[in-house]
């Protein structure tokens, strides 16, 4: 790895292979980071909210990528994450990248936000030293293996989503209902739903009543390590409180957790007490917490 002068520059499409290699090297040296497969990185870059990685940054030393920052402006925030290889830390690289990120929206600068795991003590210290404060906490929960199927309430039925305009419209509509106004919310586009559908182990379970889609559970299997994730669970407000969310989640877990030892993970706001209670009833346990650190509001 290069140990010379570190250059901060914009990320380019030609950096994709170098970024994947960077993630692999960094994850091998720091367990708080994780390797990212090439296909997953490509889908992330292509997601509408990232605008083709327009605002991403690279840190490079002697032709080797030693740092990477993701940055996107959405939902009234400048969302970012800065990753520096352990061998390149303590040299001001992260601070220089943060300075560049905070200048990306000048002169009208929105609040900046970074999600930081509680186990990443250095990251929390860095954010606090730069004036960020922790606001909302998310729980990471997990369980092993499938769960028994749960019948939906009377009058409802569960089914797999089809690759159709009607189901995609319902998917985007329910996502808006469930997450609009959240700190991490960005509206789904047709391009986003196509990207999600292309993921290995993609699963989208829909709940219907009288022919109308009133709930969903989107899940996937992460190709990096084979772990399964519940991405989102939404039930339309007028259909809540009847056990539909629990039935949807159980159905999705049964689809993506094909073996008893497969880990299924999810994130949920710590103050979302009803959702947390549903997941605990399904055997999920809290394993870590992530806080949203915000500057500028």
Image (tube, helix red, strand yellow):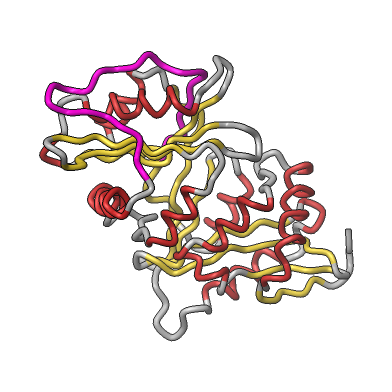
Q: Nearer the viewer, residue 60 or 188?
A: 188
Q: Where's residue 102, x and y in %?
A: 52, 73
In the image: residue 57, left or right of residue 154: right
Q: Position of residue 143 (x, y in %)?
A: 48, 21
- Residue 81: name its quadrant: bottom right
- Quadrant location, the N terminus: bottom right
Which residue is depicted at the point 45% across and 29% down?
141
Q: Residue furthest bottom?
A: 107
**Residue numbers of the magenta segment:** 138-162
Front one among 58 and 39 = 39
**Residue 95 figure quarter:** bottom right
Residue 270 shows in this picture: no
Q: Is residue 104 above or below residue 147?
A: below
Observer-nearest of 25 and 49: 49
- The image shows residue 214 at horizontal and vertical percentages of 19, 40
Residue 69 figure quarter = bottom right
Position of residue 251 in the picture relative to residue 113 (left or right): left
Q: Residue at x 56, y 49 (%)?
A: 124
Q: Is residue 206 left or right of residue 163?
A: left
């Amino acid at each position: 790895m290069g140990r010379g002068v570190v250059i901060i520059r914009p990320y380019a499409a030609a950096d994709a292979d170098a970024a994947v290699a960077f993630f692999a090297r960094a994850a091998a040296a720091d367990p708080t980071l994780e390797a990212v497969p090439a296909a997953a990185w490509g889908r992330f870059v292509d997601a509408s909210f990232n605008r083709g990685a327009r605002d991403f940054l690279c840190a490079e030393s002697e032709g080797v990528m030693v740092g990477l920052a993701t940055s996107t402006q959405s939902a009234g925030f400048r969302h970012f994450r800065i990753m520096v290889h352990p061998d390149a830390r303590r040299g001001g690289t992260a601070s220089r990248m943060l300075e560049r990120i905070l200048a990306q929206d000048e002169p009208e600068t929105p609040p900046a936000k970074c999600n930081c795991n509680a186990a990443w003590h250095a990251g929390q210290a860095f954010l606090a030293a730069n004036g960020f404060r922790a606001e909302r906490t998310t729980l990471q929960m997990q369980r092993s293996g499938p769960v028994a199927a749960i019948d939906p309430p009377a009058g409802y039925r569960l089914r797999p989503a089809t690759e159709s305009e009607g189901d995609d419209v319902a998917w985007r509509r329910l996502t808006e209902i469930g997450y609009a106004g959240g700190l991490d919310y960005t509206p789904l586009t047709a391009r986003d739903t196509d990207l999600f559908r292309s993921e290995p182990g993609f699963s989208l379970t829909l709940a219907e009543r009288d022919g109308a889609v009133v709930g969903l559970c989107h899940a996937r299997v992460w190709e990096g390590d084979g772990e399964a994730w519940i991405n989102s669970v939404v039930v339309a407000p007028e259909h809540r409180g009847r056990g539909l969310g629990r039935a949807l989640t159980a159905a999705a877990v049964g689809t993506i957790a094909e073996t008893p030892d497969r880990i299924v993970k999810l994130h949920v706001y710590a103050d979302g007490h009803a959702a947390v209670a549903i997941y605990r009833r399904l055997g999920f346990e809290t394993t870590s917490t992530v806080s949203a650190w915000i500057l500028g509001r």
